[in-house]
Image: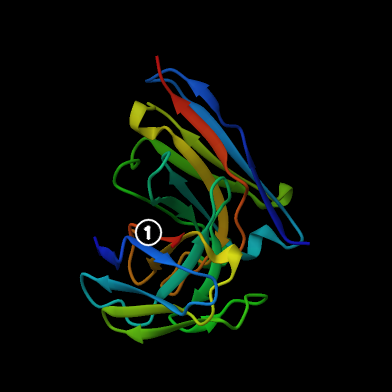
Amino acid sequence: DIQMTQSPSSLPASVGDRVTITCRASQTVGTYVNWYRQTPGRPPKLLIYATSNLQSGVPSRFSGSGSGTDFTLSISSLQPEDFATYYCQQSYSTPWTFGQGTKVEIK
Amino acid sequence: EVQMVDSGGGWVQPGRSLRLSCKNSGFTLGDYAVTWFRQATGKGLEWVGFIRSKDYGGTTEYGASVKGRFTISRDDSKNIAYLQMDSLKTEDTAVYYCTRGLGIPGDYFDYWGQGTVVTVSS
């Protein structure tokens, strides 16, 4: 199975900050990495698919990059609704697997 | 409006069975794979499995922790998919989500059900 490792696990930040979350795959996943945001009691929300494609309706402050084994999600200016947990996910080979999550918290 | 609605969760004793349902609206379910994920309280997301669309053979794949115990099926005429869970274990306790996807490399999940809670306990 492909392991996805996110860092950091916790990220204290303030509204307006630029934040970056990284995700490393245990083997190459091409560009088949997606990013989700989840708030408590809610299902995940797709932000970015295939490394860098912004899902329809998602604000442009979100962006993704990377290839192979190393990927990044960036938020250019953190908004109140962005305090949440973020997950990367690979769909290169089954089982589809997720990172352990990065919780963006209020500093 | 595109929606996925999952239902059927509840409390069940270990070793028993439960069937979850996933109903959609706003699109043709038959054009998509249906994928199930789960999330234990305070934990991360785990892929349970999927059933591909008929165009991709309608085949299924499952995660190792549920293979042989869980079965995904679909009835495209009714726009509904099912997750049959047999021989349930306490570690199957989680919120279960259904999503639409592709069931192929490059898959991604843009619409999720609200989640249905399954509790396996004696």
> In which chain is the residue bearing label 1?
A
Residue B57 seen in this snapshot: no
The percent coordinates of residue B59 (x first, y second) are 46, 56
Q: Is residue A73 or residue B113 the one in the foreground? A: A73
Q: Is residue B26 above or below residue B24?
A: below
Residue B40 lies left or right of residue A68; in this view the side is right
> Badge 1: few (under 14), some or many (20 or more) residues near its Cα, within 10 Å?
many
Which residue is depicted at the point 39% across and 34% down? B92
Which residue is depicted at the point 41% across and 72% down? B105
Residue B22 lies left or right of residue B102; in this view the side is right
Numbered-mark total: 1
Which residue reaches farthest left? A26
According to the picture, the residue beneath numbered tag 1 turns out to be: A101
Q: Quadrant of the N terminus of chain B?
A: bottom right
Please tell me whether mark 1 sits on a helix, a strand or a loop.
loop
**What residue type is disc 1 on?**
Gly
